[in-house]
Image (tube, rainbow, N blue to C red):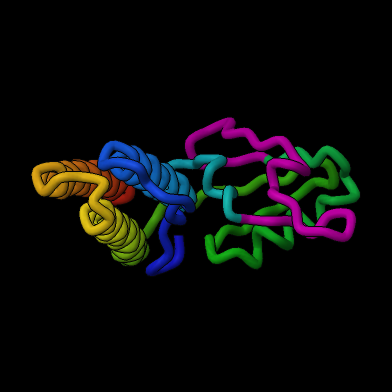
């Protein structure tokens, strides 16, 4: 998720506070899923095929995710192997990995690509944690933006006389509770990932 970007607001009118809450929950769930997806591409000291989730390979004239053109395996904690479905793509896959910002050095024997996962230096771990904090913060901002949108929708329901002032108050309280819960969830995910990055194997 890019800074400031957030799961899009649903179109159409809300009829009641429950509709607003349900829409907010769906969007906040999306923010959590998106954070999990982005964190999977951040390196830890262990080999993981999720590292390559963000990499696309120029294959047959168009960019394709690496797992659409090859099978990925982790035969040992510090090695990933990549078996292209079509060996003519081996050069393109290797080039895509080299030009990514993962800092990995693949090699191939004409049939199989081997990607050793070097141990992270202290410096690199700190950089990755800094990046992780930024990614987590972007997602927290997204959740707060969803809260703002939801509160605006509730205010509009009150203005259009579709709900009572009690409903309006309750709705705002519920949205705030939900926001707090999702911020905690994002924090917990980020902390677990940070522990993974800093753990020296």
Position in image of residue 102 (x %, y %): 53, 60
Residue 70 counted in the magenta span:
yes
Residue 35 counted in the magenta span:
no
Does 179 sit left or right of 54 as displayed?
left
Position in image of residue 95 (x %, y %): 73, 62
Who's the residue at 47% across and 51% down the image?
A: 12
* Towards the viewer: 69 or 150: 150
Residue 43 visible, this orientation: no
Image quadrant where residue 81 sits: top right
Query: Where does the magenta region start and end?
Result: 55-81
Image quadrant where residue 152 sits: bottom left
Does 130 sit left or right of 113 as displayed?
left
* Towards the viewer: 146 or 164: 164
Who's the residue at 75% across and 40% down the image?
A: 70
Who's the residue at 42% across and 50% down the image?
A: 13
- Name the main secondary structure of what is drawn in magenta: strand
Position in image of residue 153 (x %, y %): 30, 55
């Amino acid at each position: 998720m890019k800074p400031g970007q957030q799961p899009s607001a649903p179109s159409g009118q809300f009829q009641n506070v429950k509709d607003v809450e349900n829409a907010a929950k769906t969007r906040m769930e999306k923010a959590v899923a998106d954070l999990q997806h982005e964190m999977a591409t951040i390196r830890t000291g262990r080999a993981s095929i999720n590292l390559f989730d963000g990499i696309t390979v120029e294959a047959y004239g168009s960019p394709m995710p690496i797992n659409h053109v090859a099978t990925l395996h982790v035969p040992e904690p510090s090695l990933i192997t990549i078996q292209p479905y079509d060996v003519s793509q081996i050069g393109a896959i290797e080039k895509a990995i080299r030009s990514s910002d993962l800092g990995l050095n693949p090699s191939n024997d004409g049939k199989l690509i081997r990607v050793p996962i070097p141990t992270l230096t202290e410096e690199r771990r700190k950089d990755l944690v800094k990046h992780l904090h930024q990614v987590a913060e972007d997602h927290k901002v997204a959740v707060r933006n969803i809260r703002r949108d939801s509160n605006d929708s509730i205010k509009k329901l009150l203005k259009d006389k579709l709900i009572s002032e009690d409903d309006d108050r309750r709705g705002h309280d519920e949205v705030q509770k939900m926001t707090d819960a999702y911020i905690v969830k994002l924090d917990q995910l980020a902390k677990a990932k940070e522990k993974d990055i800093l753990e020296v194997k």
